[in-house]
Amino acid sequence: MSRSQADIQPGEAPVRRLYRILVRDLVLKCLIGIHAHELLAPQRVRINVDMSVLEQAGPLSDDIANVVSYEDVIDGIKTMLAEGHINLVETLAEKIADLCLIDERVETARIRVEKLDVYAEAASVGIEIERGRK
């Protein structure tokens, strides 16, 4: 049973409660890669985002302003991809992590970026990173 903020005794630190926001298997086309053929045509990437978010203090209200919006994250990723060519999946993952960490409620962001059409023998190739507050 979790304790409310009112149950905290004097001198005791308040409980930090986290929740997770997930974006799973977002598949988008983007210009990414270092090879000549990758400079000419967009390719499919699969993006997964997993954020640990600090829950608001006090009672939860049914208002989007009180949570980190996955819609804003997805729209931000789409805008980023529309800005032009990116050489490395590592660069894309870092940029997405930075986007997530703009909101100070986000404690950590785990980002996976996979290129889906590189090898016929593999479902995907890519990386996963985790970044947090400094």
Image (tube, rainbow, N blue to C red):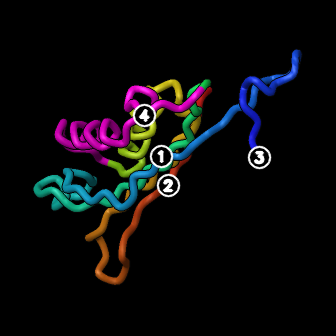
Q: Position of residue 25 (x, y in %)?
A: 35, 61
Residue 83 covered by magenta stretch: yes
> Nearer the viewer's eye, disc 2 or disc 1?
1
The residue beneath circle 1 is 21
71 or 77, which lies in front? 71
Label whose residue precedes the other's in the sequence (1 or 4): 1
The reply to whether residue 131 is visible in this rendering is no
Question: Few, some or many C-alpha atoms within 10 Å of disc 4 (few <14, some 14-19, many ≥20)?
Answer: few
The residue beneath circle 3 is 1
Q: Quadrant of the C terminus?
A: top right
Tag count? 4
Task: Report helix, strand or loop for mark 4.
Answer: loop
Q: Amino acid at mark 2?
A: Glu
Q: Position of residue 93 (x, y in %)?
A: 41, 46
- Please name the residue shown 19% across and 56% down the image: 29
Label whose residue precedes the other's in the sequence (2 or 3): 3
Q: Is residue 87 left or right of residue 65?
A: left
Q: Amino acid at mark 3?
A: Met
Task: Kindly give the residue lying farthest to the left in the view shown.
Answer: 40
Question: Few, some or many C-alpha atoms within 10 Å of disc 1 (few <14, some 14-19, many ≥20)?
Answer: some
Q: Which mark is residue 91?
A: none
- Please name the residue shown 39% across and 52% down the image: 23
- Please name the residue shown 42% across and 48% down the image: 90
Label whose residue precedes the other's in the sequence (1 or 3): 3
- Rounded to the nearest angstrom, the CA distance separating label 3 from label 4 is 22 Å
- Please name the residue shown 19% across and 58% down the image: 38
Q: Amino acid at mark 4?
A: Asp
Magenta-highlighted residues: 59-87
